[in-house]
Image (cartoon, grey):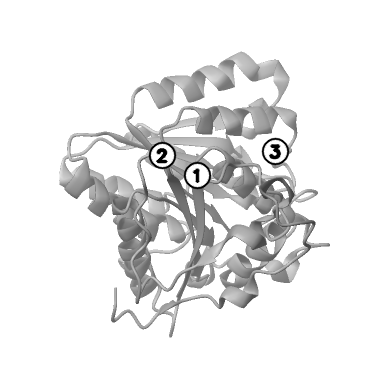
């Protein structure tokens, strides 16, 4: 970690914004975030009543380039932070909110960036904090998993991990010449878990049939993947969707929640690597489903992928991502 050249701490002065006062009930995120250089300093020890969240930027879209998508998501973590700065503080003062800096992808070395991300995620989890990784292409998922894997091996070897992915895609493409991309992370994870002798529990919510080949459906079936298609994301299917989520949550001990912003309709999320006209709507039903997952108290780590500022309109995708982050932190 200390010698990782692709890790960069964030300047504390980056966090700035509107000030309504200094009483806790007047605070906004930029007033309470602590920026820490994780290569030089350990995370503050959490006291028994305290909780902690660490934001980690993943400045990489090399996987998107390899997957022939439109690049630009490597700068998404900064736009997501900017959209989060003036969020009001609706958590108590027992929660520490920390910005743990960025992992950069240098010289197209996606694998090196994923390895460093894994080290940072493991460090954060072992310290008792919950990471929220701000992407970045969805290749973030494999690097994120490497950190979870290290943490669980050391701290919880007998526990079951479940992955819940809000996404239009399975992202289980076959690797090309042994090289991963933003379209391969969950196949990589499935094979890794298979080799480790662990069960692969994977639920995709918001899947689009017109965005996945028959081969991908066959791969998903082979690995026992559960999914709910985007056309079911409405109140008419509430019982079915909620039951699917509950059944999945009940069979695992810990959950890694990953969110690809291309799960949403392009009308709400134009700033992504691959837009989805038929994507789901971030309405009250979606919010209830998302909160249901977090209220299980089994989510130990999360990320948001594919925020592409180059194609965003009025920063609406960044604001949508910030709204998701607001829920994540509020339920930490």
Image point (61%, 41%), residue name: 327
Discs 2/3, front: 2
Q: SS class of the residue under badge 1? A: loop
Residue topped by disc 3:
280
Image point (30%, 57%), residue name: 122
Image point (56%, 43%), residue name: 328
Residue topped by disc 2:
49
Q: SS class of the residue under badge 2? A: loop
Of label 1 and label 3, which has the lower sequence position?
1
Cβ atoms at labels 2 and 1 below 8 Å apart: yes
Q: Nearer the viewer, residue 85 or 264?
A: 85
**From the viewer's perspective, is residue 89 above or below residue 242?**
below
Q: Nearer the viewer, residue 78 or 176?
A: 78
Q: Nearer the viewer, residue 208 or 106?
A: 106
Q: Residue 200 at what x, y percent from top left? A: 30, 37
- Which mark is on residue 94? 1
Mark 3, residues whose alpha carbon is within 10 Å: few (<14), some, or many (≥20)?
many
Q: CA distance from mark 2 to mark 1?
A: 7 Å
Q: Quadrant of the N terminus?
A: bottom left
């Amino acid at each position: 970690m200390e010698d990782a050249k692709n890790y960069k701490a964030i300047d504390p002065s980056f966090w700035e914004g509107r000030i309504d006062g200094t009483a806790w009930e007047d605070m906004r995120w930029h007033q309470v975030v602590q920026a820490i250089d994780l290569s030089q300093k350990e995370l503050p020890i959490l006291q028994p009543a305290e909780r902690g969240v660490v934001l980690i930027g993943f400045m990489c879209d090399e996987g998107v380039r390899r997957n022939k998508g439109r690049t630009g998501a490597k700068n998404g973590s900064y736009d997501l932070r900017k959209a989060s700065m003036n969020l009001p503080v609706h958590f108590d003062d027992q929660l520490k909110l920390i910005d743990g800096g960025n992992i950069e992808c240098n010289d197209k070395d996606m694998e090196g960036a994923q390895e460093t991300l894994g080290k940072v995620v493991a460090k954060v989890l072992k310290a008792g904090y919950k990471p929220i990784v701000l992407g970045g292409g969805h290749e973030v998922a494999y690097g994120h998993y490497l950190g979870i894997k290290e943490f669980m091996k050391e701290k919880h070897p007998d526990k079951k991990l479940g992955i819940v992915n809000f996404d239009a895609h399975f992202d289980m493409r076959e690797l090309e010449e042994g090289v991963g991309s933003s379209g391969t992370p969950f196949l990589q994870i499935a094979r890794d878990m298979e080799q480790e002798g662990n069960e692969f529990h994977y639920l995709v919510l918001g899947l689009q049939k017109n965005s996945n080949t028959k081969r991908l459906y066959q791969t998903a079936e082979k690995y026992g993947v559960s999914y709910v298609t985007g056309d079911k994301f409405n109140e008419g299917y509430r019982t079915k969707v909620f039951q699917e989520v509950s059944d999945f949550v009940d069979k695992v001990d810990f959950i890694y929640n990953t969110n690809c912003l291309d799960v949403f309709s392009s009308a709400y999320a134009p700033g992504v690597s691959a837009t989805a006209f038929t994507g789901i709507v971030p309405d009250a039903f979606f919010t209830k489903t998302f909160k249901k997952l977090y209220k299980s108290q089994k989510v130990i780590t999360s990320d948001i992928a594919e925020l592409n500022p180059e194609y965003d309109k009025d920063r609406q995708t960044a604001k949508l991502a910030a709204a998701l982050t607001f829920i994540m932190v509020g339920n930490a």
